[in-house]
Image (cartoon, rainbow, N blue to C red):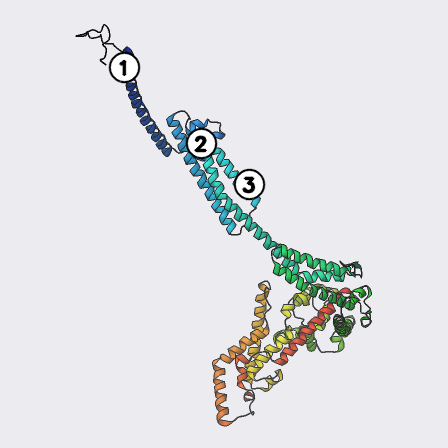
Amino acid sequence: MAEKLPRYRPLGVSIASMPSIDYMTAAKMKARGFDQTAAALDKLSSFAFAKAGEYKVEEAQKFRYDNPVTAEQLQAAISSGRDIDEIVGDNYTIFGRASRATVGVQLRTELESQARSQMSAISAAIDSGMDLDVDQLRSQFEGMISGHSDLLAEVDPSEAYKYSAVVNTLAAPIYKNALVQEYKKKQDIAEFNTRSQFLELPNALAGIFTADAGGKVPDANGKDILESESTAKAFVISLANDAFNANNPDLANEIMKEGDKLIDDAKENALVRFGIDNPDKDITMGDFGDKTALWNSVDEKQKESVKERIRKEREKRQTKKGEEETASQKANAKLFNGHLDIIAGVSPLERGVDIETTIRNAYTTGRDSGLTTTQVKSQIESAQKQKQNPNTVSAATFEERVKDNDFPTLPALFAAAKDAGFTEDDVARWGWISKQGDALDVAIKADNEEAEALLQIQFGISSLKEVMQRAPVVAQAYMSHRFAVDDKHAELVQAWKDGGSSGPRPKKRDVALEQARVIAASEPATQITNLLVTLNANYALGNNDVWTQRNYKEINVNNLNVTDTKKNKINEVVQQISDAEQRLTAIRSGP
């Protein structure tokens, strides 16, 4: 069906409609353009500001690099009340915040370095075994970390957290190591103390059983046992527990193993001591007084051992007592005789002895005279001239001679002391034997005899009488050397006195020995020796001549030693000195 045309529809050319204008869209487009321009300007300004900020950050970082703030400076500023912003920078500007952040990093690095150094030193001290208090060490760590963190928090809290985390991590193993070392040290000390007590256990047990008086107490099973034994076993068990606590089970087992044996030994020793200290007790019948209960607690083998030990010790003490009584009797006899000599006070002259013998006996000993021949002659002539007892000398002279040790035998000293007006107390007060013991040595008598013997060996002379029978040249040589020894000895003694009498007193034997060496090494002696050897080899002189009566090997210096005979004589003199000292002690204490 054909479409119907609309009614009144114009036909032909239509009139164009008027165009419409959208003012809103245009406004929006214009506004969008302005927005784009503003955004572009914002980006431009943001970029500029960002670049400026980066520059300020770099500038702040460089500034802090050139002008770092140390922990010491910061602490000083805070202590003085200054605002911290003045030191590290503010929190509201780019430069200030960058400066503050840089200071925080610098400060954390510095404080971490300090902490590491301190911890390294502490760790080394711990490893070396230095004694450190772990509680004090912990306080030191906590104080350091807390102080550093608080200081960092004033600048940058985030850096404070970082510091605390790092340093706490470093401190933990060091503190643990300190705890381990302290524990080991305590164990070592405990073990040492336990071992020390173990070593002293015999003495401790001895004290327990020595104090035993027979008291009894019930044991764990209700059976009565000696209180001392209960105490001893408890002590051993306690000591073993100490060893276990010291982490040394081997020592604990050793203590328990040895404990029973040590207890048995201590029991036996206590019984032996009782038997020795109480000789009136009949141990064969088990009479041990208040130790009878202890006696009954040991086995038969121990009882036999106790009785045998007591028997031997009693016999030993009885023998020693008898020897002491015998020695005491002998000493009393000597002391009695000495008192008689002193009390009698009879001088050699009153006994009818000639003057020369008196001087020789009172003033000298040994050789024909301990004095030189010239000194003896002078003494004799002086005594004869003054017609007085030659023993009488002034107190000062006598005391000086005592100090010089001119009285090596007690009778000579007492006789001269009494004649000089001194009492026995005076002699005892000087204590000449004790003070001059080193100077006495083997006494002047032995010294003179050895000196004389050395010279006689060189000249083949047995006595002074033989000197007069020898050829004048031999006698003259002998006396010359004899006087040389006397004079040299006197010179050395004087030098010894002038030097404060320090060191040992010069001995005549040493002077004579040196003189003998001089003679033996001299050219004439060598020639004579060679001649005699040749004559004896060719003509068999034998024993017809005095010079060939001795084997010239004796002249050798290596053979100029003290003979056994003289050693025995020396020992006799030493014993006389000891007896004299006892006599002086008795005199000092009175009858």
Instruction: Pick the residue in front: 157 or 43.
Output: 43
Label annotation for residue 139: 3
> From what the image shows, is residue 125 above or below residue 368?
above
**Label 1 residue SS:** helix
Which quarter of the figure is the C terminus placed in?
A: bottom right
The residues tagged by marks 1 and 3 sit, at their Cα atoms, a distance apart of 73 Å
Q: Earlier in the sequence, mark 1 or mark 3?
A: 1
| Residue ID at (45%, 28%) | 84
Q: Position of residue 392 (x, y in %)?
A: 71, 69
Q: Which residue is mark 1?
A: 30
Instruction: Pick the residue in front: 225 or 275.
Output: 225
Q: Residue furthest front?
A: 1
Q: Quadrant of residue 579?
A: bottom right
The residues tagged by marks 1 and 2 sit, at their Cα atoms, a distance apart of 50 Å
Which quarter of the figure is the N terminus placed in?
A: top left
Assess whether mark 2 and mark 1 are in contact (beta carbons under 8 angstroms). no
Assess whether mark 3 and mark 2 are in contact (beta carbons under 8 angstroms). no
Residue 427 shows in the view? no
| Residue ID at (49%, 29%) | 80
Label annotation for residue 156: 2
Q: Nearer the viewer, mark 1 or mark 3?
A: 1
> From what the image shows, is residue 375 above or below residue 156?
below
Q: Residue furthest bottom?
A: 539
Identity, as a three-letter code, of the amino acid under mark 2:
Asp
Q: Position of residue 497 (x, y in %)?
A: 59, 65
